[in-house]
Image: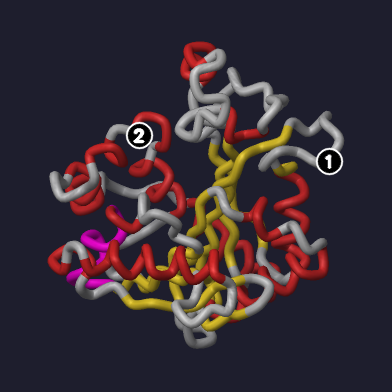
Amino acid sequence: MKRLILALAVAAATMPAAHADDALKAAIASKERTPANAARDPARHPYETLTFFGIKPTMTVVELAPGGGWYTEILAPYLRDKGKLIVAGESPDSPNAGAKRYADNLTKKLASNPAMFGKVQRGVFEPPRAYDIAAPDSVDMVVTFRNLHNWMADGDDSLKKTLAEIYKVVKPGGVLGFEDHRLPAARAAGSTGGYVHEAYVIKMAESVGFKLAGKSEINANPKDTADYPKGVWTLPPTLANKDVDRDKYLAIGESDRMTLKFVKPK
């Protein structure tokens, strides 16, 4: 029976949308978005990515480690009227000066446009120090974009703790959506410049109870060789080498990225 229930949950999680999500398209097309953010849509595929995860406007969604708010600008208006968005990142009270700076920048971002961000709630997600993401079993979906490679710094046990804290807040049958820079399977792990083995991500997520529900190649980039002197930050948008070989790296584009969907079994 448990296997049947899990199979049904996975099938539901991977089922394609029956029709276009006009509300999501409208949020992505909004003139309220930062122009520089919107200009990156062709490389980041926000509609296809969020649709693959199975997002709906009635959901309670956590965005982990929102950074500068690229996805927050889409999720906040999309979920504003019928759902709920919780952005969980560094704490404004963090003893770490860098973390506090990120938190303060997010505070300013949210305050800059009350019409867009006025209903966004805050959570704390500062691995491995602090986790106050949301109430247990309260979230329909957790999404995070290009962040897991940062959580690996303190080793497997620390990463498992972080993933277990995420697992706690997701409802049974809920979704965890991952996107991160993909290290080629044949390349040895180690100092990989921000790239991660897809198999490793799956193994670690499943080690705390999540089950893989699907993979998408929507954010794949076969031009990315993942072997640059300054890691993934060599590529746009960072362009860590500045003007050195700039045209070469612009021609490659943003990184090759895995896009993975997990479910928490019912």
Measured from the top left, where is residue 193 in percent x and y? 70, 38
| Label placed on residue 132 | none
Q: Residue at x 31, y 41 (%)?
A: 37
Q: Residue at x 67, y 60 (%)?
A: 151
Q: Is residue 258 above or below residue 178?
A: above
- The quadrant of the image that shows the C terminus is bottom right
Q: Residue at x 59, y 45 (%)?
A: 180
Residue carrying label 1: 189
Q: Is residue 38 above or below residue 90?
A: above
Residue carrying label 2: 40
User: Looking at the image, what colour scheme do you see?
Assistant: secondary structure
**Which residues lie in the magenta part?**
74-83
Measured from the top left, where is residue 169 in percent x and y? 54, 79
Q: Residue at x 55, y 48 (%)?
A: 146
128 displayed left or right of 200: left
Q: Secondary structure at mark 1?
A: loop
Cα separation, mark 2 vs mark 1, equals 29 Å
Residue 1 seen in render: no
Q: Secondary structure at mark 2?
A: loop
Magenta-colored stretch includes residue 79: yes
Q: Earlier in the sequence, mark 2 or mark 1?
A: 2
How many C-alpha atoms fall within 10 Å of the one at disc 1: few (<14), some, or many (≥20)? few
Using the rendered view, name the quadrant where residue 63 is placed. bottom left
Predominant SS of the magenta segment: helix
- The quadrant of the image that shows the N terminus is bottom right
Magenta-colored stretch includes residue 142: no
